[in-house]
Amino acid sequence: DILAKVRSDEQWLSVLSEAFAMLDRDSSGKIHVQNIADVMQAFNEAKSPAEIKTMVQRFDVRKTGTIDFDEFCIMMGPAYYTRAGGSEEELARLFQTIDVHRTGTINQSELKDVMGRLGQQMTDAEVNDMVCQADKNSDGVID
């Protein structure tokens, strides 16, 4: 059972919980179709309304028209457990999506823009902190 496997993995459960909270913009405990569409678009993975509806229907086991946290775990769990060897590719693809100026680095402006498109309005200080945490060579950007 994928849900039990996800719930027993504290690290993955924490990642999913943070992602879910970001998508659950109205704090209803449910992700609405538009929230999913917005996130997909923010990461240049635009899907048609029909494709988004199909995704929701596939994982909406309770048939509410939304995705709750358990359903989200079921939807996202297999991606984590079956991506052996693919995680670096996925990370590189995500990096390229955020690196809109194609410089090979992610600056504070790019990070703040992507976070804003995901519904996370951040102060310059918060973005600076994120960059500093990921900046391995202290040049002020993520590379």
Image (spheres, rainbow, N blue to C red):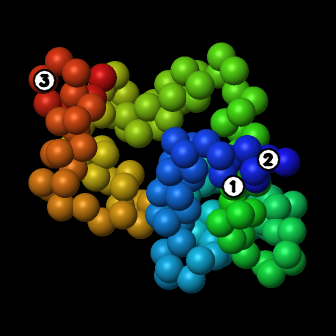
Residue found at the very far front of the displayed protein: 8
The residue pinned by badge 2 equals 2
Looking at the rendered structure, the number of numbered marks drawn on it comes to 3
Q: Secondary structure at mark 3?
A: loop
Location of residue 28 in the rendering, given as x and y in whole percent from the top left corner: 56, 83
Query: How many residues crowd around disc 1 within 10 Å: few (fewer than 14), some, or many (20 or more)?
Result: many
Name which residue lies at 36% across and 64% down.
120
Q: Secondary structure at mark 2?
A: helix
Q: In terms of depth relative to the viewer, which is nearer, 46 or 119?
A: 119
Q: Looking at the figure, which quarter contains the C terminus?
A: top left
Type of amino acid at the residue the image marks with label 3 = Asp
Q: Amino acid at mark 1?
A: Cys
Q: Quadrant of residue 137?
A: top left
Of the residues under marks 2 and 3, which one precedes in the sequence? 2
User: Residue at 79% across / 78% down in the picture?
Assistant: 65
Dividing the picture into quadrants, the one containing residue 125 is bottom left
Q: Which badge, 2 or 1, is on the more N-terminal residue? A: 2
Residue 108 image-quadrant placement: top left
> What amino acid type is highlighted by mark number 2?
Ile
Disc number at residue 139?
3
Label 2 crowd bin: few (<14), some (14–19), many (20+), radius 10 Å? some
Residue underneath mark 1: 73
User: What is the x, y in percent for residue 74?
Assistant: 76, 54
* Mark 3 touches mark 1? (CB < 8 Å): no
In the rendered image, the vertical position of residue 35 relative to residue 13, given as above or below: below
Image coords of residue 106 (percent x, y)? 30, 33
Decide: few, some or many residues near mark 3? Use Cα within 10 Å; few <14, some 14-19, many ≥20. few
Q: Secondary structure at mark 1?
A: helix
Q: Position of residue 104 (x, y in %)?
A: 34, 22
Horizontal side of 104 relative to 130 (left or right) equals right
Ranked by sequence position, the earlier of labels 3 and 1 is: 1
